[in-house]
Image: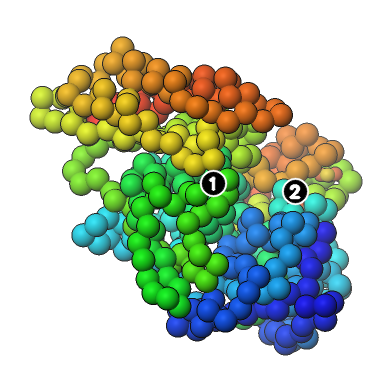
């Protein structure tokens, strides 16, 4: 390819808004969200699929945005951490619970934790502690020791069960 | 940690895919991307062409056929895990998938991708070997079927020509009631297995073992069937002593060694995990 950048036009829905952009075909979704859409809430750390910090929700399921090309998201509905709260600023129950239960310290892993947990709890609000621990087993946190994250997730699940 | 430049192709049909396979060189096929994307990001892989098969029609889905369970190569691990057909005909696969990566990687990762990537410690080739899977391969020169037992040519090398693609896999699932077990040892949940073991047992009317299959991964570059143990089990009653005797066959297999894990340790794990997998299989076979 001799360094020639191949580009493509893609159209997708990000946090409820349809976006259309020209993007380099080798660019991964995480970089596209951060650089092209300036949605820097999605964090990138390892960029090879081991830390989970880049997790976004793609067509309803949590995925690692560093392991998907932006062009592969053509036609998809993507939710990032910026899209979890209501447009009026009301926090998602998982965000509210992280705030209440001190589910974060430095915040680096937090977007990936929130998107992963929002997706699994929305799908199954009856999820138990083992299910929560399994769900975040692919998300590395170097600060909290995970206990407060698990507490927050269980509390958010309880809130969502009541809301349902 | 950014992928090198490549020409990107996203065919929509198998015919279009075959056309690309026949005309391009130095290509990589992109399925779920959970192994190839890291390899691109780290520039271990430097293809001139990436053929993304995510939008090829007809490559995902599971159906029951006369031969067993036919699983499209692009079927996501999450879809395999949740399909009622898997639970009914290959429940050991559902159990094995609990060990594969994490929720975020199973959302994208595919069965076909795992069988082409062939990480020696991967659970999915282990399950394929347990069910004597047949791999349906296609290319511009025609279609062919390859047995899982002929599929692994060497370390992470499938019997796939550069112009061929894996389209689907048939697991020769067992008819009638039978028991199953899957056991694994890894440093942390979701990490690559050091060793994993799958077992299937079918009992006859008198409670004796009529049929047995045992498959191990992580011991060699390819999944290993423990044929000697399978033969030993047939006709015997599945009591603890018999299962332990069969599992001890694993102590004789050749195991790979690396900087962290010795072959000796893998052999010990293989025997222990085989015994545990057989024990769950026997309990479930008895119902
Ligand atoms: S940045 Fe994607 S998994 Fe680490
Ligand atoms: S809060 Fe710092 S890494 Fe998790």
Q: Residue at x 33, y 46 (%)?
A: B131
Label 2 near ligand 1 (CB < 8 Å)? yes
Q: Chain of mark 1?
A: B
Q: Residue at x 36, y 41 (%)?
A: B130
Up-down: is B160 above or below A15? above
Q: Residues within 10 Å of mark 1 (few under 14, many from 20)?
A: few
Q: Position of residue A123 (x, y in %)?
A: 54, 57
Check the image and name the residue furthest to the top: B241
- Given residues B47 and B51, the one toward you in this image is B47
Q: Is residue A61 left or right of residue B229?
A: right
Figure quarter occupied by ligand 1: bottom right
Q: Residues within 10 Å of mark 2 (few under 14, many from 20)?
A: some
Same subunit, tags 1 and 2: no
Up-down: is B234 above or below A15? above
Q: Residue B284 sits in which quadrant? A: top left
- Given residues A103 and B247, the one toward you in this image is B247
Q: Which residue is mark 1?
A: B154
Q: Which residue is mark 2?
A: A51
């Amino acid at each position: 390819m001799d360094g020639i950048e191949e580009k493509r036009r893609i159209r997708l829905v990000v946090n409820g808004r349809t976006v259309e952009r020209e993007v380099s075909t080798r660019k991964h979704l995480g970089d596209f969200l951060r650089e092209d859409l300036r949605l820097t809430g999605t964090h990138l750390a390892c960029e090879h699929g081991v830390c989970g910090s880049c997790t976004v929700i793609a067509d309803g399921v949590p995925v690692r945005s560093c392991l998907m090309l932006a062009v592969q998201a053509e036609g998809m509905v993507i939710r990032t951490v910026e899209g979890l709260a209501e447009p009026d600023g009301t926090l998602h129950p998982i965000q509210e619970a992280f705030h209440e239960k001190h589910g974060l310290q430095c915040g680096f892993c937090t977007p990936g934790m929130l998107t992963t947990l929002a997706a699994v709890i929305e799908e199954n609000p009856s999820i138990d502690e083992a299910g929560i621990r399994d769900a975040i087993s692919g998300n590395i946190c170097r600060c909290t020791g995970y206990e407060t994250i698990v507490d927050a997730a269980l509390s958010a699940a309880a809130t969502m069960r009541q809301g349902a | 940690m950014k992928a090198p430049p490549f020409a990107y192709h996203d065919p929509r049909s198998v015919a279009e895919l075959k056309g690309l396979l026949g005309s391009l060189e130095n290509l990589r096929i992109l399925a779920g991307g959970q192994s190839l994307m890291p390899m691109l990001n780290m520039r271990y892989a430097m293809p001139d062409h990436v053929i993304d098969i995510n939008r090829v029609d007809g490559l995902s889905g599971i159906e029951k056929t006369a031969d067993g369970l036919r699983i499209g190569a692009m079927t996501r691990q999450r879809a395999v895990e949740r399909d009622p057909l898997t639970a009914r005909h290959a429940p050991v696969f559902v159990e094995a998938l609990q060990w594969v990566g994490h929720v975020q990687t199973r959302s994208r990762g595919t069965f076909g991708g795992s069988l082409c990537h062939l990480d020696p410690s991967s659970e999915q080739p282990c399950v394929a070997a347990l069910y004597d899977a047949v791999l349906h391969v296609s290319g511009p020169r025609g279609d062919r079927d390859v047995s899982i037992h002929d599929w692994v040519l060497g370390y992470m090398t499938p019997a796939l020509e550069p112009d061929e693609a894996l389209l689907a896999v048939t697991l020769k699932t067992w008819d009638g009631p039978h028991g199953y077990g899957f056991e694994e040892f890894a440093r942390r949940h979701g990490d690559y297995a050091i060793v994993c073991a799958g077992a299937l047992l079918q009992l006859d009317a008198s409670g004796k073992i009529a049929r047995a299959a045992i498959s191990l991964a992580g011991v060699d570059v390819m999944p290993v069937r423990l044929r000697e143990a399978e033969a030993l089990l047939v006709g015997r009653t599945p009591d603890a002593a018999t299962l332990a005797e069969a599992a001890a066959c694993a102590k004789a297999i050749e195991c790979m060694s690396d900087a962290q894990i010795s072959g000796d340790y893998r052999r010990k794990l293989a025997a222990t995990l085989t015994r545990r997998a057989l024990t769950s299989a026997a309990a479930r076979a008895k119902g």
